Image (spheres, helix red, strand yellow):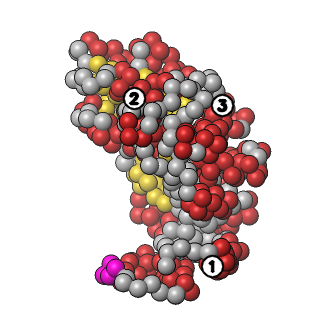
Amino acid sequence: MLELEGAQFRAVIDEVARRLADHLDHVAEQPVAIATERAAEVARELAGAALPEAGAPLAAVLDQLFDRVFPSPYHTGSPGFFGYFAGGGLPEAAIADLIAGVINRFVGRWSAAPAVTQLEANVVRWLAELIGFPAAARGVITSGGSLANLTAVFTARQRQLGFDLVGARIYASDQIHFSIPKAATICGLPPASVCRIASDGDGRIDVAALAAQVAADRARGLRPFLVVASAGTFLTGAVDDLAAVAEVARREHLWFHVDAAYGGFFQLTARGRALLRGIEHADSVTLDPHKGLFLPYGTGALLVRQGDVLKRAHEIDADFYGPLHDDADRIDFCSYSIEQSRPFRGLRVWLPLALHGIAPFRHNLDEKLDLAAFAGAALAEIPGLAVIAAPILTVLLFTAGDDARNQRLVERVNARGHAFLMTVQHHEAIVVRMCILSFRAHRDRVEVALADIRAVAAEL
């Protein structure tokens, strides 16, 4: 009863494809935001659903999903979504997931599917080359930046400290992503082990303060072992002085990790490479293809300069699976991460690149840099508004004067349905944040968003 013949499978796929194609044809017309209460009402109704004993017709199931479940307060796939860093949702990646799920090969060990595993290893190598890592680099495709950062912190812990964690210290700016302190906790380190270094007016870590804190902690008998730099913070998109942080790490014998989940793929552009100078000196780097390569949520990556270090941190042989490979060309991904059973994530990165090449992604990222600069200049000309953080990459902050006015501006702009903005806290004030990163966002939608902002600002 569970097996599908080819014709039955085609019928299911054809119906699903029809609805998805209709969604894609109208994705730009859909409101960027709907009332939260409408979606919450559906969620409350679903909360009491019982486990079905018998199945329902395909059409009824799809009606429930497309008409009731999928409409959400935030339409993160819209060209007008300028809120947090959204997963782009490139459809070719979803096609890859379909292929990977149906073919269903095990990629935890090389011997189970050598060519499939090699394809994912190629993706990791391409990403490592983008960063500027040597051929000895290795890495894993993860479910996102949080798991990549956790894997990096654990690898650094094993390489620098082993299991003796007394006095361990991690350094990062006060703008670091919350996944870093969370990773430290999971790795057995108390909250006080994460030392937050003040950031400067541009949101970058104060390198002199970093060096002084490391020296002071050593003098106190503590054990500095890891420094984390940001290549694109959430709040302003700031990029730390990676070359300077790398020099501190080298001098102090610290593991140097760069959280480049947001900003890393701007390395594809000339402007991005200039900002990210020094990333090639990192010991490990986190990337999120679901940001800079516009792929669906759940696509992250960790790259480690010395692949053998990543392997030593994670490898535990289990005889009932057969021996692991020592050959560097026969990669057992279970030896490089916490996962044994894992999906074939590499295909969702490989297929879009195979179909398009890297050039359109580079062009799209350059376009986003241009659009952010255009938006920043236009906002500065709107009466009653002030840009308080010009775009470094594609994030900018502006204000309409005070917390209440900023909150009202965001609510009224979002209610118009063309653009989605968000408020954030910056230096104790509530301000408006705009992030332009969707591959569907082009000049026309940015101009519509600016027109809505201009009109609402005039009302305020």
Disc number for residue 313: 2
**Which mark sits nearer the N-terminus, 1 or 2?**
1
The crowding category of the residue bearing disc 3, from other C-alpha atoms within 10 Å (few below 14, some 14 to 19, many at least 20), is some
Which stretch appears magenta? 47-51
- Alpha carbon distance from label 1 to label 2: 46 Å
Most common SS among magenta residues: loop
- Which quadrant of the view contains residue 271? top right
Image position of 457 with respect to 138: above or below? below
Q: Amino acid at mark 3?
A: Glu
Taking the spot 74% from the left edge, 64% from the top edge, the residue there is: 444
**Can residue 13 be found in the magenta stretch?**
no
Q: Nearer the viewer, residue 367 or 53?
A: 53
- Alpha carbon distance from label 3 to label 2: 23 Å
Mark 2 and mark 1 in contact (Cβ < 8 Å)? Answer: no
| Label 2 secondary element | helix
- Alpha carbon distance from label 3 to label 1: 43 Å
Disc number for residue 129: 3
Q: Position of residue 192 (x, y in %)?
A: 24, 33
Q: Amino acid at mark 2?
A: Ala
Disc number for residue 140: none
- Which quadrant of the view contains residue 47? bottom left
Looking at the rendered image, the disc whose residue lies closer to the viewer, 3 or 2, is 2
- Residue underneath mark 1: 8
Q: Position of residue 292 (x, y in %)?
A: 62, 47
**Which mark sits nearer the N-terminus, 3 or 1?**
1
The crowding category of the residue bearing disc 2, from other C-alpha atoms within 10 Å (few below 14, some 14 to 19, many at least 20), is many
Q: Is residue 57 visible?
A: yes
